[in-house]
Image (cartoon, grey):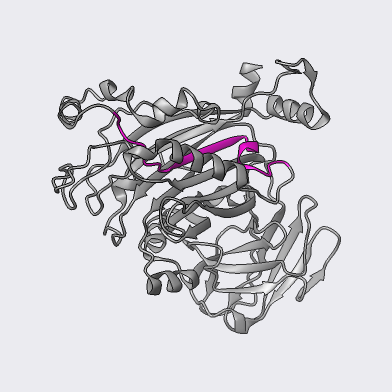
Amino acid sequence: FESLYFQSSVSNRLHIVTWNVATADPPDDVTSLLHLNSLKSPDLYVIGLQEVYSGPLRFVSDLVFDNPWSLLFMSALAPRKYIKVSSIRMQGLLLLFFSKLEHVPFIRDIQATYTRTGVFGYWGNKGGVSIRLSFYGHMLCFLNCHLAAHMKYATERVDEFEYIMDTQTFECEKAPRIIDHRLVFWFGDLNFRIQDHGMHFVRTCINNQTYNLLWSKDQLIMMKKKEQMLQEFEEGPLDFQPTYKFDLNSDSYDSSGKKRKPAWTDRILWRLRPKASTHDEPHGNTLDASEVKQLEEDKEYPLKIRQDMYTSIMEYSISDHKPVVGIFTLELRKMYKTPLVRLQAEGDWSADIDAVVLYSPLQPFPSSTWDWIGLYKVGFTSVSDYITYTWVKDDEVAINEEVIQVYVSKEEIPVQGEECMLCYYSSTLQCIIGISEPFKVSNIASAHSCLFLTSS
């Protein structure tokens, strides 16, 4: 079985960032944060921020337009052929999910939601935002939290986390709750502190890089020993210096009158759904039909996770927190390998003749009158970054059962001399389900050339 697994599985690299940005404006450069110079480029980026500035004017404008942080990450990643697949914001909490273009037609069932836990802070200040999706059929969920502050509220932090886990729900039959997902990542400013040890001992351990001497008094590690839900989450070793609290624009810990004790407030954990066994061990109960189906699916489509890096990025000093990065390898067997739709740009595209798109459904999917095909420049940033679009049902003519033709009016094609691509957006599935190869929109129409381009 193991040899079969490794023959049929593929590796996908995931780069997660968590950073409490303390209402600061974005830095000029995020190369180090995203490891843009690394030889191995991630397949997916997930970026969770806390305390993004949400003053009244900024927050209202951000509801309509992307905020400065989102724009920064999109502008850094779009030239490298990543697109923003999903995002969600709840006041200071922001979660962004980016994917390499080649994976986008295989990311489906995307939903995002939020939970407020404002008991210990003011309204909307604390809580969790999450994005869940299916990646080649595997159910993944990403949860970005900002939990209650201060040393004495460790139990309340756990209560807030459990409240978010219990109350967040999704319109998904296979995974209606966070806990139902095959793989969950939990990260953010979780605000757990280092108990009991005095400031001098903590600082000495940091200076000597003997971080392991502090682990036993880290509140999250302590809480894991007695909280069942926490025990199901794994975390890599804290082999980096505590990421809070720093003087702004420096690498020096808090020198203010409060002199807060350093702490690993910023964390990244994960939970791989426990494997079901053929019997419910404590009671000897036989599994029901859905559990048997899950067991069979888990065996047929294995998913393994390995953490390759867990560290802080010390060079950023705009906040009193340092960002934390976790890099993972997901070994998985794909549940599907072909997109739902193949798109082809037919003929020569230019602004002075009507254009034609051909598409072929490769598998049954819930098509809708609200489905559309968008024309995008190569290097586009997100689903909404189209040049123009056409409603599929309004302008389509079936050539035969397998190929459908859709007309795009020349008035709708303002670009000239650009490399472009087509994307089919399913309104029912709320995602892109087919992408064409790049093609040129000419300056001058040529009646004699004909170009057929298919998705890979």
Which residue is situated farthest in the right direction here?
401
Position in image of residue 155 (x %, y %) = 44, 36
Q: Which residues are magenta?
A: 174-195
Residue 73 percent coordinates (x, y): 39, 57
Depth check, front residue: 389 or 306: 306
Does any portion of residue 274 appear in the rendered image? yes
The answer to whether residue 156 is left or right of residue 292 is left
Q: Quadrant of residue 405?
A: bottom right
Above or below, comparing residue 451 to residue 446 in the picture: above
Q: 294 above or below 164? A: above
Residue 313, percent from left and from top? 28, 42
Q: Give above or below for 98 relative to 53.
A: above
Identify which residue, 246 or 142, lies in the foreground: 246
Q: Is residue 266 visible?
A: no
Q: Residue at x 50, y 77 (%)?
A: 416
Quadrant holding the N terminus: top right
| Image-based side of 422 in relation to 48, left or right | right
Q: Is residue 182 magenta?
A: yes
Q: Residue at x 55, y 30 (%)?
A: 229
Q: Give whichever of 189, 329 is nearer the camera.
A: 189
Query: Which percent across, then down, holds residue 330?
Result: 53, 33
**Residue 327 falls inside the magenta stretch:** no
Rendered residue at 31%/52% (across/down) = 30
Q: Which residue does the image show at 30% across and 50% down from the upper left?
A: 31
